[in-house]
Amino acid sequence: MTENIWDYPASAGHTPDVDLTGYKVEATDGHIGKVDKHSNDVGSQYIVVDTGVWIFGKDVLLPAGTVVGIDAESKTVQVARTKDEIKSAPEFDKDKHLGDAGYHDQVGTHYGTTHSGGAATPGTPGADPSTLGRPMI
């Protein structure tokens, strides 16, 4: 069964009652920013990352299925995407993301079909965490 890109993988260590706001976000190749907001709504879970000056202040929406590890102690979220994959993602649009299914499809397709772990099908939650070259959290 294929996991939904808009739900946290069971192996990510997500706990619904933990507020991820302010957590550092790490791509497979380094730091990309901090969590500005997040959603725990089943079937529509995500984090919005404030990339600061890294991408000229661009906010990006990352489906929860891209998250491979959450470390509450270090307040860090690891995602199974590279900086370039995140940089090339559609920009977060706060007006579209809540009511526009097409926008979610566009974002989900971007992250579900492009990642450094090889070709994936839409809805695939990301690369196998063991291939990230980092210990699991």
Image (cartoon, grey):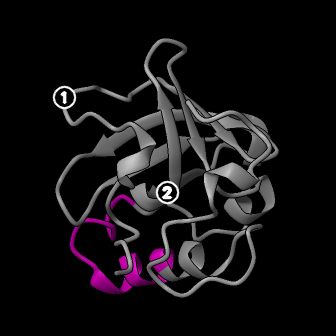
Q: x%, y% of residue 105?
A: 40, 83
Q: Amino acid at mark 1?
A: Asp
Q: Quadrant of residue 131?
A: bottom right
Q: Residue at x 21, y 73 (%)?
A: 99
- Does 94 appear above or below 105? above
Pointer 1 local density, CA inside 10 Å: few below 14, some 14–19, many at least 20: few
Q: Secondary structure at mark 1?
A: loop
99 magenta-colored: yes
65 magenta-colored: no
Q: Which mark is residue 66?
A: none
Q: Does residue 5 appear to the left or right of 67 in the view shown?
A: left
Which residue is more in the foreground, 59 or 74?
Answer: 74
Pointer 2 local density, CA inside 10 Å: few below 14, some 14–19, many at least 20: many
Magenta residues span: 94-108
Q: Which mark is residue 17?
A: 1
- Does 19 appear above or below 10? above
Q: Quadrant of the C terminus?
A: top right
Q: x%, y% of residue 48?
A: 45, 47
Q: Secondary structure at mark 2?
A: strand
Q: Does residue 86 appear to the left or right of 44 in the view shown?
A: right
3D distance between C-alphas at marks 1 and 2: 19 Å
Earlier sequence position, callout 1 versus callout 2: 1
Q: Does residue 100 appear to the left or right of 76 in the view shown?
A: left
Q: Residue at x 74, y 49 (%)?
A: 132
Number of labels in the image equals 2
Q: Quadrant of residue 117?
A: bottom right
Q: x%, y% of residue 26?
A: 67, 37
Q: Quadrant of residue 54?
A: top right
Residue underneath mark 2: 62
Q: Residue at x 63, y 51 (%)?
A: 129
